[in-house]
Amino acid sequence: MLSLTLALVLFLNLVLAARSPGCGKSATIKSQTYSTTINGKSRQYIIRLPNNYNNTRAYRLIFTWHQLGSSASSIAAGEDPNKGGVLAYYGLPPLANESAIFVVPNGISNGWANSGGEDVSFYDKMRDTVENDLCVDTSLRFHTGFSYGGGMSFAIACARGKETRAVAVISGSQLSGCAGGNDGVAYYGQHGTKDSVLPVANGRALRDKFVKNNGCTAVTETQPGSNGKSVKTVYKGCKEGLPLTWVIHGGDHNPSQTDSGSSKPFAPGNSWEFFEQFKSV
């Protein structure tokens, strides 16, 4: 009987450990823009709560990092994907089906130079603020972004790998540093072979960092077909809980790339499929 009781206590401790301090609290945070100060600089970010937020339900926490020259408000509102823009929140909310809290940070000079690690510190402050007020499953933190936003997602995977469940890097490069960078993180990467801004070799370098960290078996990359259609490679041999998926396509530097014959960008569905496989501990 004692061993059964002990097992129950350990199980409950594990479950509770994945719930943020905000669980059960009356939330003061709403879906709106907030400000904080990092290194004496005022920083802004937007929070999007699920409809009918429930303070007893532990939600996924998804950070969406914007590209160079864009802003948090542009990501929150969405930009015309036919003109190289992104769907609102990278198209994830309709797929998440009210299971996630979204945070959209605003970069200094519309970018993520992460000088002295200040953008990682900004992330730390946002994470703590959200989780102290709202109910978050702390085992289900995710990051995604396009271009510079992909670089910042990569930087978070490097610097905060132990607390990051997965990242989805779209047409990224190592632009925001990689402090630490030794922990495995579930990794989705996507890049175009005709990328004229950040060559595909840059995206492959980010991918290969986590092929190594995640213990995956290297593979010969399949190239897009003659029509540039995207090709998805799911790596084998990765450590338990650390999958890696790579999508290569024949397009340019485009967050809303579509396959031939389709008007639907494939990044949202691929990213959500990758994120959704992870469940609460």
Image (tube, grey):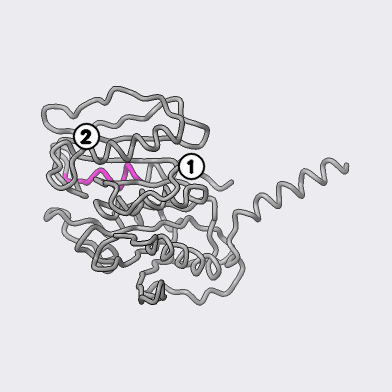
Name the one closer to the observer, 208 or 141.
Answer: 208
Give the quarter of the image for residue 123. Answer: bottom left
**CA neighbours of label 2 inside 10 A, class few (<14), some (14 to 19), many (20+):** many
Q: Position of residue 269 (x, y in %)?
A: 31, 44
Residue 151 drawn at (x, y percent):
30, 51
The magenta segment: 263-271
| Image position, residue 162 (x, y; %) | 52, 48
Mark 1 neighbour class, 10 Å CA radius: few under 14, some 14 to 19, many 20 or more = some
The residue at the point 16 percent across, 36 percent down is 193
Q: Which residue is mark 2?
A: 230
Kind of residue sitting beneath label 1: Asp
Q: Residue furthest right?
A: 1
Residue 268 among magenta residues: yes
* 119 over 5 or under it: above or below: below
* Nearest the eye: 170 or 135: 170
Which residue, given by chain and number where applicable, does mark 1 sit on?
183
Q: Secondary structure at mark 1?
A: loop
Identify the image quadrant of residue 37.
bottom left
* Camera-side residue of 205 and 82: 205
Secondary element at image label 2: loop
Q: Is residue 111 magenta?
A: no
Instruction: Name the one closer to the observer, 108 or 261.
Output: 108
